[in-house]
Amino acid sequence: MSPPERRARLSPRAAQLPPETREELRRHLRGLIENNRVMIFSKSYCPHSTRVKELFSSLGVDYNILELDQVDAGASMQEMLFEMTNQRTVPSIFVNKVHMGGSDRIFQAHQSGLLQKLLQEDSTYDYDLIVIGGGSGGLSCAKEAATLGKKVMVLDFVVPSPRGTTWGLGGTCVNVGCIPKKLMHQAALLGQALLDSRKFGWEYSQQVKHNWESMTEAIQNHIGSLNWGYRVSLREKGVAYVNSYGEFMGQHKIKATTRKGQETFYTAAKFVIATGERPRYLGIQGDKEYCITSDDLFSLPYCPGKTLVVGASYVALECAGFLAGFGLDVTVMVRSVLLRGFDQEMAEKVGSYMEQHGVKFLRKFVPVTIQQLEKGSPGKLKVSAKSTEGAETIEDVYNTVLLAIGRDSCTKKLGLEKIGVSVNERSGKIPVNDAEQTNVPHIYAIGDILEGKPELTPVAIQAGKLLARRLFGASVEKCDYINVPTTVFTPLEYGCCGLSEEKAIEVYKKENLEVFHTLFWPLEWTVAGRDNNTCYAKIICNKLDNDRVVGFHVLGPNAGEITQGFAAAMKCGLTKQLLDHTVGIHPTCGEVFTTLDITKSSGRDITQKGCG
C-alpha cells in the first residue's frame, strides 16, 4: 500500500536494469524468502503492515521485515516482487517460502488454520515439490509453485520413439502435438487458398509446389525456440530442471537417471505426476520396425509420399487431412467409427468432406502384417489387412505407414507400485479425487494420465496452476472439467463444447431435448465456388432447463476461433433465448448461431441459398 501522494509509478530505472543486475536482485530476494521462516516486504508508513507485524508478534513468531521505502533499490525490489508473485502492493508476505499475499490473505489464513499449518511445516526434504514430466501441465504447476515461494524441481526425460525420435522440454503439445499439427494444417490451408486466389483475380503462371523439407525445417526452428523459452522461464523462476528419468524409490524419494545411466536421488515433501501419454503400436509384425507415429511425423526429414494412416482418432484424421492438402496420396484405414467419443453426425460429416477432397477410406479393416519391400527415404512397405466383418483380406504398397490408433499413459515404469499409488491396470491411468490427489496423500497427478478427464493441453495447464495454488497458496479453487471446448483441425475444422447428441440423449432423454441446426455457406467460399451446403452448425438444448445449451457443434473454417467464444457463453449458462437476443456480426460464420430457427424434429430443409 502507499498513500495517494506516494502512489507513484515504479521507477523507470527499475524496468531498465541490466539482465545481470536483475538476476542478482532476484537471487537476493529469493535468499531472503528461503532463509526466513516469515519474510515481510513492507513500507514503513503502511498501516496494513503494522497489523500483520502485530499478528505474528501475538503468535510468538519471529519475522524478518524489509521496508522497501527505506532502501535505495526499493522500487526495483517491488517490481521484481511483482514479477515473482503478481502482487503489486505491500505488505507481501512469505511463510516458509509460501507466498501468502497481503494482509487480508494472511488474516484469512490465520482464521482458517492454514497459517498455523504452514508455520509448523518442517523442511526435511530436498524440495518442497518435484514434478515428474516437463509437458504443459507439469511446467504450469512447477512455475506456479515456484512463484508461491516453494523450492521446486522438474524431472523430464523423453524416451526415444522406436524410430529414435526425441525432443526438448515442453511435452507432446509443443514438440509433437498441437503446435506442429496446427502449423502443418495451416500449410495445407495455404495451398487451398492459392487455388481460391485465382477466382479472386490473382494471376500467376509459375508452377506452385510444396516443399516438405522447407516446411519441417521452419516448424522445427520455431519449436526449438519454444524449448529454449521454457528452459529460460524455469531458470528465471528458480525451478531446478533435470533432464533425467524419474522413478519412485520410496514414499518421498525418487531416483533420477540420465541418458548415460548416471543415477541421482532426490527427496520432496510432495510430488506431481504429469508424464502424459505416448502413441500406441499395433503389436503386429513390422509395426515398430517400419511404421511411424505422430512422434516422428513432424520432424520427418523427407516427404512421406503415398501414406496409409491407420486409425480414426482426431490425430489420424488431422494428419491425413494436411498430408492430402500437400497433394499426397493418402488412405485412412478405419477399424470401426470415426472420432470415437465425438458427436457421430459431425464425425461422419468430417469424413465425408475429406473423402470428397481426395482422402480414401478403408472401412472395417485392420492391418495384420507390414513388410519392407524397399529401403529408402521414404522406401516401400507392403501392408496386409483383414476385414473386421468377414474373411476378406487386402494388400497394398505404401511409402509410409502412420499409426494413430490411440495413446498409452506413461505410468508403468515410474515405481508407483512401490509407494502404493493406484493405477487402472487396463488403461494405465491414475484415479484421483476432485483435487487431483491420488490415494497416496502427498502424490498428485494432472493431465492426460488422469482417469476420466479430458486429454487436452489447456486442461492440464489449468489443473496444474490451480493445484499449485491450493497446495502452496491460500486458494481453494479446483479445475472445472465440465464444458471444456476443443477443435479437431481436419481440412474442414470441427469445434465442439459440451455434450455430443448421443451423450445428451443418454443423459437427458430425447424427448427432453431440442436440436437446432443449419447448413451454411461461408462468404469466402462463394466467389471461389467451393462446396455450398457443406458447413454445418447445431446446438442441443435442454427443454427442461429453459432451453439451456448443453451441446455446441460447428463444422467450418476457423471452427476453433468460433468455439472458443461460445464456450465462454456456455460457462455463463447460455440458453437458446440468449442466442436469439444476440446480434450477429455480418458476414461471419459464427453469426449462424444467432439465427438458428429450424429444429431437427421439424424435418424442415436446412440448405442455404444465400446470405441471411
Image: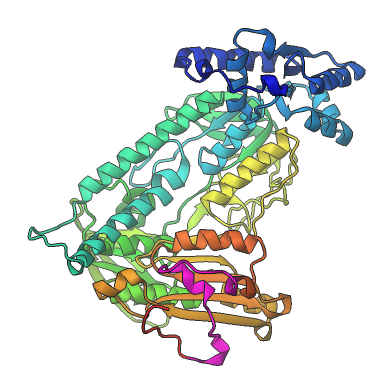
Q: Residue at x 60, y 62 (%)?
A: 569
Residue 513 appearing in the image: yes
451 sits to left or right of 295:
right
453 sits to left or right of 389:
right
511 sits to left or right of 116:
left
- Whether 546 is drawn above or below 153: the answer is below
Q: Residue at x 34, y 65 (%)?
A: 491
Name the quadrant containing residue 286. bottom left
101 sits to left or right of 458:
right
Total of numbered circles in the picture?
Answer: 0
Q: Residue at x 50, y 20 (%)?
A: 15
Q: Residue most toward the right?
A: 58
Name the quadrant containing residue 41. top right
- Whether 347 is drawn above or below 432: the answer is below
Percent coordinates x, y for residue 414 in the rendering: 58, 40
Nearest the viewer among 326 and 366 is: 326
Q: Residue most toward the left?
A: 205
Percent coordinates x, y for residue 533 in the rendering: 37, 80
Magenta segment, principal secondary structure? loop
Point out the stretch of residues depicted in magenta: 579-604
Nearest the viewer among 403 and 560 is: 560
586 magenta-colored? yes
Percent coordinates x, y for residue 69 in the rendering: 68, 12
Percent coordinates x, y for residue 375 in the rendering: 18, 52
**Image quadrant in which the C terminus is located:** bottom left
**Image quadrant in which the N terminus is located:** top right
- Whether 250 is drawn above or below 447: the answer is above
Residue 387 appearing in the image: no
520 magenta-colored? no
Q: Residue most toward the front?
A: 5
